Amino acid sequence: MAIMTSSTTFQPVLERIAEEIERTPGRGRPADYIPALAARDPRRFGMAVADLDGTVYGVGDWREPFSAQSLTKVFTLALDLAREGDALWEHVGREPSGNPFNSLVQLEYENGIPRNPFINAGALVVTDRLHTRTGDASGELLSFLRTESGNPDLTFDEEVAASESAHGDRNAALGHFMASYGNIDNPVPTLLDQYFRQCSVTVSCADLALATSFLARHGIRADGTRLLTRSQAKQINAIMLTCGTYDAAGDFAYRVGLPGKSGVGGGIIAVVPGRCTLCVWSPGLDERGNSVAGVAALDRFTTLTGLSVF
Ligand code: GLU
């Protein structure tokens, strides 16, 4: 198998992966705990790779908008870390949780400090802190995604946000519980409104591959300005590797070997530091909440190209 050089186009490998995925039976099931997501067809599949210079290669439904959900947690973490630096880590940890993404159990043992920024409790803390610093966490996120993707049409899906709010008892419980430990600054209903809007952002693989590029560029945004220090970009990549794919991060690292973050909308973003970023989407999930075809496609990508962090 040819190992890719920096001048290789990604198009042939993407087409090969899409053909393989097309022949694979069994795609998992779309998330149904947010009713607005349940109707997506699990046979849909798209994948995009963005080079550091902004060239995007894609295959299948790579321009199809889907619900970003937890993928947004990477961006709110970056936006908050850029503002407050290490003080954030007094409020949220950096260890895998070993529990489902919306679990309440660990929070009580650990005094309202969530294990990491990618489980829901940790993401709520990050959004709360970003909201305190900006006055509009979800607006800040949307503006960042629009700028980095070059797509000014990105927007929230109000139907998805309302659907999640109507079924949001678990997230509300997490918010109130952490507030009782003094780890939430804003009124919990305000925080939940921000968080549900954040999760509802509708994006395509092309948008997200581009918007994630700052992590492959060691903290540098599309316009050449610095969002994060090189060290902070490394930190976020490391947390993605260890905590980014729910309670399957070990298996994801084993199969794919890249920092990655998944969302229940069926998207996964992944980073090859110093080389490129990827986004894959297919709405059918496995029992741990990761896109079945998405993980398989990333597994094939790193196997076929030799591009991984290991
Ligand atoms: N909005 C979803 C929730 O909080 C995000 C979950 C996810 O994508 O992991 O339940």
Image (cartoon, helix red, strand yellow):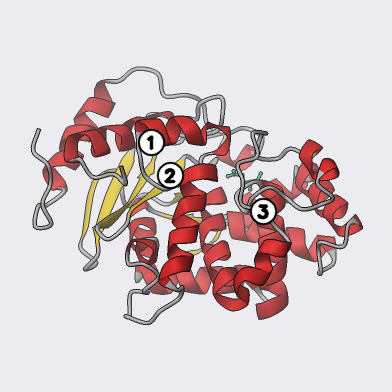
Label 3: few (<14), some (14–19) or many (≥20) C-alpha neighbours in 10 Å: some
Residue named by callout 3? 93
Regarding residue 153, the answer to whether it shows in the image is no
Residue named by callout 1? 294
Q: Amino acid at mark 3?
A: Gly
Q: Is residue 237 left or right of residue 243?
A: left
Q: Residue at x 74, y 37 (%)?
A: 103
Q: Residue at x 47, y 52 (%)?
A: 238
Vertical order, 301 against 117 (above or below):
above
> CB at mark 2 closer than 8 A to ligand 1?
no
Label 2: few (<14), some (14–19) or many (≥20) C-alpha neighbours in 10 Å: many
Regarding residue 89, the answer to whether it shows in the image is yes
Q: Position of residue 213 (x, y in %)?
A: 34, 63
Q: Amino acid at mark 1?
A: Gly
- SS for callout 2: strand
Q: Position of residue 291 (x, y in %)?
A: 45, 34
Q: Residue at x 41, y 24 (%)?
A: 27
Q: Is residue 195 left or right of residue 146?
A: right
> CB at mark 3 closer than 8 A to ligand 1?
no
Given residues 187 and 219, the one toward you in this image is 219
Disc on the earlier residue, 3 or 2 = 3
Labelled pair 2, 1 in contact (Cβ < 8 Å): yes
Q: Position of residue 231 (x, y in %)?
A: 45, 67
Task: List the single residue furthest toward the top.
Answer: 25
Residue named by callout 2? 268
Q: Amino acid at mark 2?
A: Ile
